[in-house]
Amino acid sequence: MAAYRPASGRDRYTVDKVGLLTPSSENATGFDRVEGPYPDWRMPNKVRWMVSPNASVEFVGEDEGRDLYLLKMRVLAMATPQSLSVSLNEKPLLTRRLEFPNQWLQLISEPVRLNQGQNTLKLKAERLVPSPDPAGGDLYVLFDELVFQKE
């Protein structure tokens, strides 16, 4: 697994020993804090909520860009159907339609190269059916895994 360091500022962007990305407030937007676990909700691991339809994480890759990586994500949609699109450095990486509410889905990207230096991972969730709730607060997804691993 590659090593990562903060993209900017005093906060840290860390990769813990199991590879879970835990973005800090300065280089991540659209995410809430890590919380849980919630066994009653079938969430045995800690989770991070995506609390905006658009979220992003900036991180710095320290390798020389020779290795290929897979983005692995486990997501759970709170409202369905919806789509989730993921891009890395402005290039599409994953697009999935999430059909079933409250069901975990494992997503794995095609192999990609990370930049040595700045990288930006962007996520966009989009409701495919209008919500009866004008606030639409149940749109977003949550993660208990969001990690780049060497192929």
Image (tube, rainbow, N blue to C red):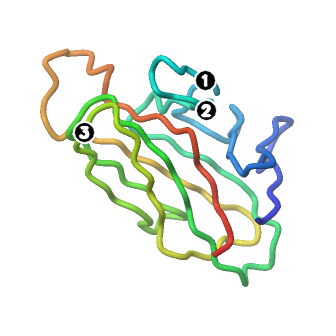
Left or right position of 116 against 80: right
- The one of 138 and 73 positioned closer to us in this rendering: 73
Left or right position of 133 against 28: left
Label disc, if present, on residue 37 of the rendered structure: 1
Name which residue type carries label 3: Phe
The answer to which quarter of the image holds residue 92 is: bottom left
Residue depicted at x 58% and y 45%: 145
Quarter of the rendering occupied by the C terminus: bottom right
Name which residue type carries label 1: Pro
The answer to which quarter of the image holds residue 47 is: top right
Residue depicted at x 43% and y 31%: 52
> Mark 2–mark 3 contact, CB under 8 Å?
no
Q: Circle 2: is it few (<14), some (14-19), or many (20+) Cα within 10 Å?
A: some
- The one of 143 and 54 positioned closer to us in this rendering: 143
* Residue beneath disc 3: 100
> Alpha carbon of mark 2 to alpha carbon of mark 3: how far?
20 Å
> Mark 2–mark 1 contact, CB under 8 Å?
yes
> Alpha carbon of mark 1 to alpha carbon of mark 3: how far?
21 Å
User: Where residue 119 sits: x, y (%)?
Assistant: 65, 61
Q: Residue furthest bottom?
A: 66
> Mark 1–mark 3 contact, CB under 8 Å?
no
User: Where residue 126 sits: x, y (%)?
Assistant: 28, 41
> Alpha carbon of mark 2 to alpha carbon of mark 1: how far?
5 Å
Residue depicted at x 60% and y 56%: 120
* Residue beneath disc 2: 45
Relative to residue 133, is residue 93 depicted above or below? Answer: below
Left or right position of 89 against 81: right
